[in-house]
Each structure stands twice: as structure tokens, then as C-alpha cells.
Image (cartoon, rainbow, N blue to C red):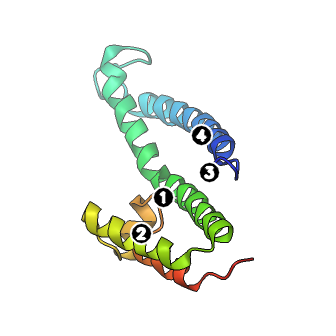
């Protein structure tokens, strides 16, 4: 990850996502309070009573952004796999280590596509194994 500048790219991505989350979160928070604040007991921005609404807004945004964050992470992990295989040329050893990792961690090596899309920060072990065995050095 260091050689591919993933640390800096990850930080830039995190900052960009944070700015978007803050902007959208504020818009949703204030719009919700204007719309439903009176029904909730005349709740205003910045009061303790508005905190549950803030938690709902943050939870919704986090839920929606989960696949985007996961896709970014999977992309970087795949790039790191390519780099590692290109540098070492140890395709079979890499595949073998992925098999052992999946066994030791007791994870599903081939999860349903939707679960991998939504939650996995790394490509599934089955995809990484297949890629390692089929990858040709550049």
C-alpha cells in the first residue's frame, strides 16, 4: 500500500467523504427539524432533544455510503495484490496463503455477491485466489 500511495489516496478519499457527509448531514438534519420539529415537541437545532434525529441522519448516510467505502477499499486491495504478484511472481504461494487465511479466519471464501458488494473491504478469498492463479506478470 505504501508504494502505491494508498495511504495518501485513502486520506484524501476520507476527507472528501467527510466533507460530503457533513454537508448532506447538515442539510438533512435541518430539513428534518423544519419539517417535523414542531410535531416532536418544538425541537430546535442544537438542543439535546434533537440528538436522536442527528443519530438517525448520520446512520442513514453511513448506511448509504457503506458500499462506496467498501468499493474504494476493495479497489486498493486489488491494486496491492497486483503489485505483490508482479514484484514476487509467487502466484501459487499467494493463492495458498489466501486459502490458509480463509480457513484460519473461518470466513466464507465465496460470499453472496451482494454481501461482498455491501460489506467487504477486501475482495473475497475466492476471487483473490482465482486472480492469483490466473495473473500474468506485466
Is label 4 in contact with label 1 (beta carbons under 8 Å)? no
Question: Would residue 66 be found to the left or right of residue 102 on screen?
Answer: right
Q: Residue at x 68, y 41 (%)?
A: 8
Label located before the other in sequence (3 or 2): 3
Return the residue at label 3: 1
Q: Choose between 126 and 24: the one closer to the eye.
A: 126
Return the residue at label 1: 67
Return the residue at label 2: 97
**Dot 2: element:** helix
Is label 2 in contact with label 1 (beta carbons under 8 Å)? no
The local crowd at label 1, few if under 14, some if 14 to 19, many if 20 or more residues have their Cα within 10 Å, is: some
Is label 2 in contact with label 4 (beta carbons under 8 Å)? no
| Residue 112 position in % (x across, y down) | 35, 75
Label located before the other in sequence (1 or 3): 3
Residue 132: which numbered mark, if any? none
Residue 14: which numbered mark, if any? 4
Please identify the quadrant where the C terminus is shown: bottom right
Seen as rendered, the residue at the extreme left is: 106
Alpha carbon of mark 1 to alpha carbon of mark 3: how far?
Answer: 21 Å
| Residue mark closest to the camera, 2 vs 4 | 2
**Dot 3: element:** loop
Q: Choose between 120 and 57: the one closer to the eye.
A: 120
The local crowd at label 2, few if under 14, some if 14 to 19, many if 20 or more residues have their Cα within 10 Å, is: some
Amino acid at each position: 500500500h505504501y508504494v502505491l500511495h494508498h495511504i495518501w489516496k485513502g486520506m484524501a478519499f476520507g476527507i472528501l467523504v467527510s466533507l460530503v457527509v457533513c454537508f448532506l448531514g447538515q442539510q438533512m438534519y435541518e430539513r428534518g427539524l423544519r419539517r417535523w420539529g414542531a410535531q416532536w415537541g418544538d425541537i430546535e437545532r442544537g438542543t439535546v432533544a434533537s440528538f436522536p434525529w442527528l443519530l438517525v441522519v448520520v446512520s442513514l448516510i453511513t448506511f448509504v455510503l457503506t458500499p462506496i467505502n467498501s468499493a474504494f477499499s476493495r479497489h486498493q486491495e486489488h491494486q496491492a495484490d497486483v503489485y505483490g504478484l508482479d514484484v514476487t511472481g509467487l502466484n501459487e504461494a499467494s493463492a495458498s496463503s489466501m486459502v490458509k487465511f480463509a480457513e484460519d479466519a473461518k470466513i466464507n471464501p465465496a460470499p453472496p455477491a451482494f454481501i461482498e458488494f455491501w460489506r467487504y473491504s477486501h475482495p473475497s478469498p475466492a476471487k483473490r485466489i482465482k486472480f492469483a492463479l490466473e495473473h500474468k506478470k506485466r
